[in-house]
Amino acid sequence: MTKPRRRTRGGFTLIELLVVILIIGVLAAIAIPQFFRVVEKANASEAMSALDSIRGAQERYLTKTGGFYCTAAFTACTGFDLQIPTLLNYTLGTPTSGMGNPSWQITATRNPPTSVYYGAYTITYDVEPNSPPIVTCSTPLCQTDLIP
């Protein structure tokens, strides 16, 4: 006499499904903040590129005029040779005289919508002659993650 065969059911058990969901959750918890950091760092590089271009134009302006840096609206400075770019994610401030003489400072403020992780922040670019610029950010997380 032959025993009847038991039907085996295919598929996953509840425990296996829960383990897979747990693994996906852990990966998402690690990957999503990293993704936002990379996106915001790319946005910050837009501001840094514009600020570096302005620095070069300021150096040329100082060489041409033999005087101080252009600290008015850039269009008001005769001989300023840079067309200021329109930034998508930031608003550039007007340059101001810095702490030393001659020196200058300019800010780039993040436009809304701001990042969920970084919020509203401002990048300050402070330039002293014959030295690298001092770049600071208004929030600690921005300073550690976005500023080179």
Image (spheres, grey):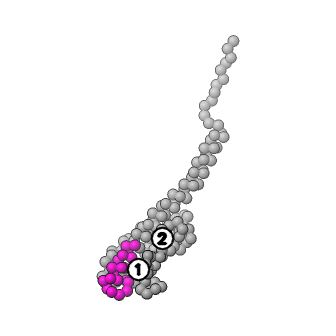
Marks 1 and 2, how far apart at CA: 28 Å
User: Which numbered disc, 1 or 2, marks the residue closer to the eye?
Assistant: 1
Outermost residue, front side: 130
- Secondary structure at badge 1 equals loop
Q: Is residue 1 left or right of residue 130?
A: right
Residue 63 lies within the magenta run: yes
Which residue shows up at 43% across the image and 78% down it? Answer: 131
Q: Amino acid at mark 1?
A: Asn
- Whether 25 is drawn above or below 9: the answer is below
Residue 42 lies within the magenta run: no
Residue for badge 1: 130
Residue 140 sits in which quadrant? bottom right
Looking at the rendering, the stretch of residues picked out in magenta corresponds to 52-70
Residue 50 spot, x, y in % from top left? 39, 71
Q: Quadrant of the N terminus?
A: top right
- Whether 105 is drawn above or below 47: the answer is below
- Whether 72 is drawn above or below 111: the answer is below
Q: Amino acid at mark 2?
A: Arg
Local crowd size for mark 1, using a 10 Å CA cut-off: few (<14), some (14–19), many (≥20): few
Which residue shows up at 65% across the image and 39% down it? Answer: 14
Residue 41 spot, x, y in % from top left? 48, 64
Local crowd size for mark 2, using a 10 Å CA cut-off: few (<14), some (14–19), many (≥20): many
